[in-house]
Amino acid sequence: MQPLSTLLMPRRKTRRIYVGDVAIGDGAPVSVQSMTTTKTADVDGTLAQIYALAAAGADIVRCTCNEQAAAEGLARIIPRSPVPIVADIHFHYEMALAALEAGVQGLRLNPGNLRKESEIKLVASEAKDRGVPIRIGVNAGSLHPDLYKKYGGVTPEALVESAKMELAYFEDVGFSDVKISVKASSVALMIAAYRLASETFDHPLHLGVTEAGPPPAGLLKGSAGIGTLLAEGIGDTIRYSLTADPVEEARAGRQLLESLGLRERKGLDLIACPSCGRAQVDVIAVAKEAQQALEDRNLPIQVAVMGCVVNGPGEARSADLGIAAGKQKGHLFIRGKIVRVVAESEMVEALVAEAERLVAEGVEARLAAADSTAEAEAEADRRALLDGGGADPNASEVRVGRIRARSGGGGAGGAGSPEKA
Ligand code: SF4
């Protein structure tokens, strides 16, 4: 099958930088970032969060370096971290220098916060000497007042010009190991700003919708902004900014990239039909139960929960594994082929057991081990449901009967029908 990512716009060519051992830009896999919420001086607490973020899919983790104690914490955290660490410098260039001394693999500077040319150049020179890349992290909320005035507000042009000015300082000291972000909390504004940035710079771009808020709205905003740009081939590394446990950010970033085919599946992808009047089971409850049972097992497969055997196995034939309900049974299928029929009460248990075997033994082996009568039994259940019309959980037929009774039982030719008018 054609790789999913080839269905998107081709990825934009950029320079390549490295944050530790993670390549960014020039065709490298799009990486996921997140940020710790602990005090960086709390070494064990911060490391625990970094490990949780890495397990959830973060390739790079950013920590605040806002004070001396944080810089000292970084010096102790970095050697024990499973992923490269980027330090976020807020207002003090001294903290950037201290973070470099601590051994960080990347810095983030906000041009709106650190404004003195001499200080910016000093940090860039020091980063250059140590081979550490810097993200020019422009943020709509902290745009330099001069640019705000010049453009009459926060515009895509103003955000890109802010990055351009910072880049010029860096280039003055011969430093170009840079990635750029032009984040805004408005999805439309950030999309326009990144499009302009991708035309303006050949540096890798770090995508994000800033201050997106708590899920689910924050997730939707992040996905709309980051997903749109990635589909256009723009973006080399991403971060969801959620008001939530940062593990959710890392997980969302990873899932977005997997859903676009930009990263290989690392964990479970549970899909489920939206359910409809034909459903033979409470799809929402079964999908939730399956998610809970499968989630912690870290199985890199797509699993489908489908409400009926009439359409389920066909609709989800691209899933590695699925189960479809019907006639108080669960019809287990692998890549659309029915392999076993179980009692409805055993659906989730059977699904989990098959998922584990599928990962351990592979698709071919599990198809070869299929129950030889399963296909015929599923077909008989499917036929019976089609012939019998299936369940009527929404009482549609009762309503139709009432409508017909009102119109005198004439169906399409009843009173008020267009034909009679
Ligand atoms: S699989 Fe069946 S129940 Fe689910 S949406 Fe399709 S037709 Fe409806």
Image (cartoon, rainbow, N blue to C red):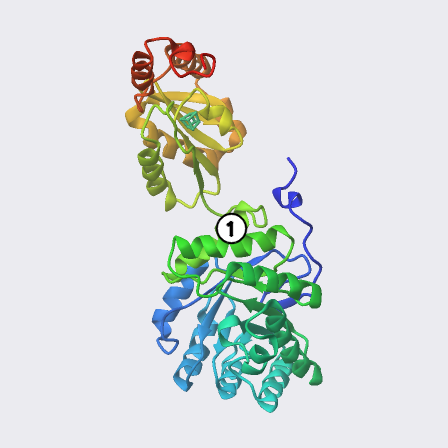
As drawn, 161 above or below 379: below
**Residue 185, horizontal then vertical, whole percent:** 48, 64
Would you say 344 lies left or right of 4 here?
Answer: left
Nearer to me, 415 or 166: 415
Q: Quadrant of residue 2?
A: top right
User: Which quadrant does the N terminus fall into?
Assistant: top right
Seen at 67% across and 68% down, the residue is 203
**Residue 175, horizontal then vertical, whole percent:** 68, 79
Seen at 66% across and 81% down, the residue is 170
Q: Quadrant of residue 196?
A: bottom right
Inspect this view and state whether residue 19 appears.
no
Name the residue at the front extreme: 421
**Residue 259, horizontal then vertical, whole percent:** 53, 45
Q: Quadrant of residue 117?
A: bottom right
**Residue 298, horizontal then vertical, whole percent:** 42, 46
Q: Quadrant of ligand 1?
A: top left
The amino acid type, in three-letter code, at marker 1 is Leu
Seen at 45% across and 12% down, the residue is 420
Seen at 57% across and 52% down, the residue is 228
Ligand 1 contact, mark 1 (Cβ < 8 Å): no
Q: Mark 1 = which residue?
A: 256
